[in-house]
Image: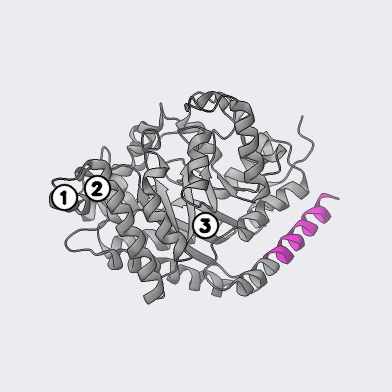
Amino acid sequence: MLEHSYSESFLRAIPKTDLHVHLDGSLRLSTLIDLAKEHSVGLPSFTESGMRDLVFKEAYANLDEYLTGFMWTTAVMQTPEALQRVAYELAMDNAQEGVRYLEVRFAPQLHMSSTLSFEQVMTSVDAGLRQAAREITEQDTTIPPFKYGIIVCAMRFFTAEFSPYYATLAAGLQFSTLREIQQLAGYELARAATRLRDTSDVQIVGFDLAGSERGNPAGSHRKAFAHTHENFLHKTVHAGEAYGPESIFQAITMLHADRIGHGLHLFDADMIENPEITNTHQYVERLANSIAENRTTVEVCLTSNLQTSPDIRNIREHSFARMLEYGLSVTLCTDNRLVSNTSVTEEIQLAVNSFDISPDQLRNIIIHGFKRSFYYGSYAEKRRYVRQVIDYYDTVYQDFLRKRR
């Protein structure tokens, strides 16, 4: 029996963040259909109900089925106008449920071609987010302003078929292995990201490693992340989603990760494959304590994890409970609003309905999102913004208590 309860109106009213949301997994379904018609992209269905039945389901067999929807979303996001529209709508949808800080991530190389450069891709997405942030903030100046940042994703795995950019790259590197091409693409992206951040006002705040985790170790991309680390660009890494604690360890020790995307299998000692690790439970214990002590924030995506990990039969089996027990810095995120059919409010609602989260714990989880964000601006500016958010949260909470009396 859970001790604490929170109304949906309260969870919608509190200021929130989403630090782990993929642009190409979070389109409005109506927009996907509109853009497909506009750009002559064939879809399995041109009705929202049909796409829900065939592609964007409530449950998936595994991670591979979950990822099939991205084939359709990326196909319609190949023009500046489409990228700007999708980014704008994503920000507006978040604002409607009380999100005040948003970090959007995506892989620019999936959208690049001979007619669409890295800079054009990034400026288009930034323009959409910037326009939305301005409109959202102007709507109500009594609440914390809407802020955003962009996280650039390198891909762990890709082939020439993934995008025109990758096809061109592979054609020009005929004597390189696929792994070497993937590493080079990541390093090139890291250099492009830091350069554009330094020469424009595009709000690039972080670098990520995404894509198929098993068989594609984080350590392969050390050169790309060393470049971002040396150039003071924040780092988050998808780790522990489809692979075990060793993946998280690599993300932290080899890629200098400031945050971990998912971290689902952090405590699964039975997934450790290195024969030199003889005491697997001690390894997990030390890893979890190290993450806690260093405040390496875990971006938890409950619904997404349930959909991609069929072995989790019940939400209460999710490692989120143990993360709270260990005192980890955690924040609740959507991962993909369209593919997972969720929102930030729904993720928080799922958490408080499934785990015994006290008011202080909930406040900490929400504030961690703001504190551990890759804020675009100085540290002093970030501190003032976070203080504004905390004060607003406390005001909303006091109002919630008065209404309950």
Upstream in sequence: badge 2 or badge 3: 3
Amino acid of disc 2: Ile
Of residue 332 and residue 117, the one placed in the foreground of this image is: 117
Amino acid of disc 3: Asn
Location of residue 386 by image quarter? bottom right
Looking at the image, residue 322 lies above or below residue 363: above
Q: Main secondary structure of the magenta part?
A: helix
- Circle number at residue 94: 3
| Element type at mark 2 | helix
Question: Looking at the image, is mark 2 or mark 3 nearer the viewer?
Answer: 2
Question: Is residue 393 in the magenta section?
Answer: yes
**Left or right relative to 328: residue 247:** left
* Residues at marks 2 and 1, CA–CA distance in whole angstroms: 7 Å
Upstream in sequence: badge 2 or badge 1: 1
Upstream in sequence: badge 3 or badge 1: 3
Residue beneath label 1, please? 173
* Residues at marks 3 and 1, CA–CA distance in whole angstroms: 41 Å
- The residue furthest right is 405
Q: Can residue 160 be spotted in the picture?
A: yes
Of residue 42 and residue 270, the one placed in the foreground of this image is: 270
| Element type at mark 3 | helix
The residue that appears at 77% across and 54% down in the rendered structure is 400
Which segment did they paint magenta?
A: 389-405
Residue beneath label 2, please? 181
Where residue 283 appears, as percent x and y from the top left, is 60, 32
Q: Residues within 10 Å of mark 2 (few under 14, many from 20)?
A: many
Q: Can residue 84 be spotted in the picture?
A: no
Question: What is the tally of numbered marks visible in this picture?
Answer: 3
